[in-house]
Amino acid sequence: MSQAVFSWPVRVYWEDTDAGGVVYHAAYVRFYERARTEWLRSRGIVQSSMASELGVLFVLYRMVVQFKRPARLDDLLEVRLRLCSLSRTRMVIDHDLHLAADGTLLGQATAEVACIKADSFKPRSIPPDIVKELHA
């Protein structure tokens, strides 16, 4: 699946770091999550509306994270993501985390996101209107 790359800036704050000013490993997952949310929003897909209007949710099913180099307090980062595959109930998204100043690759993640029913948490097909937006 050939998709354009979506980019989202992230600033490293004190709350993202350990006592040494290095980004704590769990913060990387938050950076990737924020970028995925903003990517969906840029396509007109608002997750709170999905739940209330369509009765569906996107949930993180699996994530593989690689840490290449440390990010530090006050760094400006750029999360780049692209949709790799889309099936009836799931999508796979690749993420690259770069230092905005010089493009140094700091980390990578592949996320598998599943569509579920909001009331039962059981798998459900991604609604056709959302599939259309994801293909756009």
Image (spheres, rainbow, N blue to C red):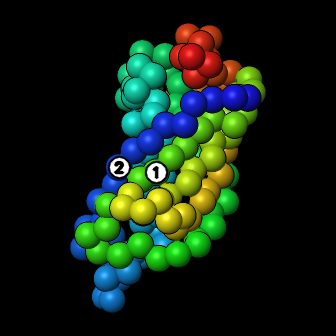
- Quarter in which the C terminus is drawn: top right
Name the residue rendered at 35%, 75% in the picture.
72
Q: Residue furthest front?
A: 102
Q: Where is residue 16 in the image (x, y as percent from the top left)?
A: 33, 70
Q: Quadrant of residue 123?
A: top right
**84 or 53: which is nearer to us?**
84
Residue corresponding to mark 2: 9
Is the Cβ of the residue at disc 1 closer than 8 Å to that at disc 2? yes
Q: In which quarter of the image is residue 130?
A: top right
Tag 1: residue type?
Val
Name the residue rendered at 53%, 75% in the picture.
69
Mark closer to the chain start, 1 or 2 = 2
The answer, for residue 2, to whether it is visible in the render is yes
> Considering only vertical position in the picture, is 115 above or below 97?
above
| Residue 79 - label | 1
Name the residue rendered at 57%, 30% in the picture.
4
- Per the image, label 1 sits on a secondary structure element best described as strand
**15 or 78: which is nearer to us?**
78
Q: In this view, does 25 lie to the left or right of 91?
A: left
**31 or 107: which is nearer to us?**
107
